[in-house]
Image: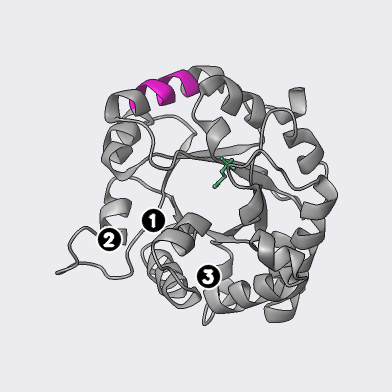
Amino acid sequence: MERLPFIAGNWKMNKTVEEATGLVRELKTSLSGVKDVEVAVAPPFTALYSVSQELMGSSIRLAAQNVFYEEKGAFTGEISPLMLKAIGCQYVIIGHSERRQFFGETDETVNRKMKVALTHGLNPIFCIGETLKEREEGKTFSVIRRQIEGGLQGLGENEMKGVVIAYEPVWAIGTGKTATPEQAEEVHRFIRERLEKLYSPEIARGVRIQYGGSVTPENIRGLMGQEDIDGALVGGASLKAESFSRIVRFREM
Ligand code: PGA
C-alpha cells in the first residue's frame, strides 16, 4: 500500500499571532506546487484561529499541539477537542515527549486524549519514543511496546485508520543528534510489527509513521529513503519557511 508522506511542523511555544500568520503566508508561497506530500503546521493555541483563516483554500493542514480529554466544563486552562474542531484543526499532536516529561502526561492520559480526539473527528499524531537512559539500558523496544499498548488501548481498527504515529527518540529532540536512518527504521519496523499483532496486516501497512528529532533539510532524504519511515514531525527546522519547505520538498533535493 502506498502511504502518502506526511510532514508536520511542530512550532512548540514559539510565534506570536503576527509571526505565525507571517510564517504561514511564506509557506503558502514556498510550498505551492508541492504534490504527493501532505503538510501540516501546529502553531501554539493563541495563533490557531488566525492561521486557520490564513490557510483557507490552501492544502496545508492545521494541527494543534495538545488537547484535553473532556469536552467542556470546569478545567481551567485546558482546550477541548470541540474547540479545535470548530476552528478547522484536522490533526492534534498527542503525548509529545515534552508533555510527558514536563506536564505529567502518562500512557493513560494519552490514551484518554486519543479516544476523545477521534470521537470528535480529529486525527491524532500519537508520539512515542525512548529516553537516552532507556536506550542505553537496552529498553527501547519494551518502552515503545508499552507506549503503543497503553496509548492505543481500546482503539478499534476503524479508529486506527485515523491515527498517525510519530516515533521521536527523546535523545534526538532539539539536540542536533538525529537517529541514523537505520536506527530509526529499526524502531519504525518494530512499531509496524506491533500494529500487525494488535490489529491486522492491513492496518499495519496503512498507518503512517513519522520520525521526529532534529530533522533537517540535510538529513530528511536519508530518513525518507527507509521503507517504514513515512514522514517527519519537525520542531526547530519548521520555524523558518526556508528550512521547512526544503524538508517538504525532500524529493527535489
Ligand atoms: P526538533 O523537535 O525537530 O526540534 O528536534 C521535534 C519534535 O519535538 O517534534
Image coordinates for residue 136, horizontal then vertical, percent: 75, 64
**Residue at 75% over, 48% down:** 179
Q: Nearer the viewer, mark 1 or mark 2?
A: 1
Q: Main secondary structure of the magenta part?
A: helix
Q: Amino acid at mark 3?
A: Glu
Nearer the observer: mark 2 or 3; the answer is 2
Tell me whether the residue at label 1 lies in contact with that at label 2, contact meaning CB atoms closer than 8 angstroms. Answer: no
Secondary structure under the numbered disc 2 in the rendered image: loop
Q: Is residue 45 left or right of residue 209?
A: left
Which numbered disc, 2 or 3, marks the residue that appears first in the sequence? 2
Residue at which label 2 appears? 80
Q: Position of residue 59 (x, y in %)?
A: 49, 33
Residue underneath mark 1: 66
The answer as to whether callout 3 falls within 8 Å of ligand 1 is: no
> Which amino acid does the dot numbered 2 rest on?
Ser
Query: For the point 77% across and 42% down, which residue is it?
Result: 223
Q: Secondary structure at mark 3?
A: helix
Q: Quadrant of ligand 1?
A: top right
Is residue 32 positioned above or below 116 on the image? above
Mark 3 and mark 1 lie on one chain; the one further toward the N terminus is 1
Residue 24 painted magenta: yes
| Residue ID for mark 3 | 159
> Which of the marked residues, 1 or 2, is nearer the chain's N terminus?
1
Segment tinted magenta in the rendering? 21-27
Rate crowding at label 3 as few (under 14), some (14 to 19) or many (20 or more) other CA atoms within 10 Å: some
**Would you place residue 163 above or below residue 193 in this image?**
above
